[in-house]
Amino acid sequence: MSQTVEQMPAETNRVSNEFDYRPVPPLAAVTAVLGVISLLALITEFALPFALFGIVLGILAKRQISRSDGAFSGNWLVRGGLVLCALCLCGGSAFHAYVYATEVPEGYKRVSFVTDISKKGFSEIDGRKDFHPEVKPLDGKKLFLKGYMYPDGRAEGLRQFILCKDSGECCFGGKPALTDMIFINIPDGVPPATFYDGLVAVAGNFALAPDLRRAGELKPAYKIDASLVEAARKLY
């Protein structure tokens, strides 16, 4: 009987240790969640901040656990989240940089429709409206730019369409300025375009089109004979 009584504290202590619980700090759980979310960085560049934020929180969580003198657990959770965030940040950044660097066809120059063309507007020279002096040198050049298709009711086999600088002018009934539009012509030998309501990439020969600048009509100030029309691979 005495042997049984002596064994009781040890048995009680063993059972207590089996059910010993150390909480996981919220930062560790958040790091793991951000690690999973950061997988989206391999698809869209807009998820890259989640990976970066996860790394910062993971470092803080690891420090919190190490300074808790064993009061907190969750190192494995933090390590998993940190590995995911780091891999997605590095891999996603490299992937999106590669796509951006290779999306422009060889021999074409990347320009911004908004900043390099649309925002320049027209210039007033001797009381006469003329093309902006920074846009004029683009005449005849092979350019690559992005914009939005102006819908005209057709969806397939497009040989001509108007490209607008932003989706607001296309989708919400706004009347674009002449310099906010580019007339896109797809010559024979180039596959026709299909209407796409997202950002579109266009490559082709850029030309000033004064013959299309008739007041009161939806006629753009510029024209491109396109060699490529496709959904934009990047949103910038």
Image (cartoon, rainbow, N blue to C red):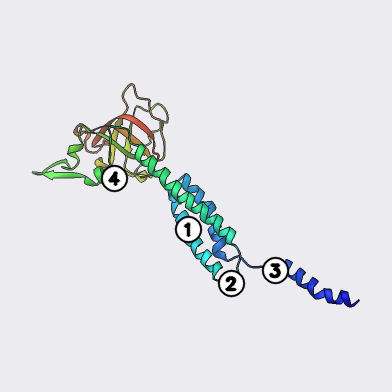
Residue at the disc numbered 3 = 20
- Residue drawn at (83%, 74%) of the image: 8
In front here: 41 or 190?
41
The residue positioned 20% from the left and 40% from the top of the image is 135
The mark that comes first in sequence, 2 or 4, is 2
Residue type, label 1: Ile
Q: Nearer the viewer, mark 2 or mark 3?
A: 2
Q: Earlier in the sequence, mark 1 or mark 2?
A: 1
For residue 127, side relative to residue 204 (left or right): left
Q: Quadrant of the N terminus?
A: bottom right
Q: Amino acid at mark 4?
A: Val
Answer with mark 1 or mark 4, whichever residue precedes in sequence: 1
Residue linked to disc 2: 69
Q: Is residue 186 above or below residue 149?
A: above
Kindly identify which residue carries mark 4: 114
The residue tagged with tag 2: helix, strand or loop? Answer: loop
Please state which of residues 31 and 144 is positioned toward the viewer in this rendering.
Answer: 31
Task: Kindly identify the amino acid type of the residue bearing the numbered disc 2.
Answer: Asp
The tag earlier along the polypeptide, 3 or 4, is 3
Report if residue 34 is visible in the image. Answer: no
Q: Residues within 10 Å of mark 2 (few under 14, many from 20)?
A: few
- The numbered mark, 2 or 3, whose residue comes first in the sequence reads 3
Name the image quarter holding residue 201: top left
- Residue 182, x across and y down, in percent: 28, 36
- In terms of secondary structure, where does tag 4 sit? helix
Quarter of the image that includes the C terminus: top left
Q: Do the CB atoms of the residues marked 1 and 4 lie less than 8 Å apart?
A: no
Circles 3, 4 touching at the beta carbon (< 8 Å): no
Q: Which residue is painted at 36% across and 37% down in the image? A: 102
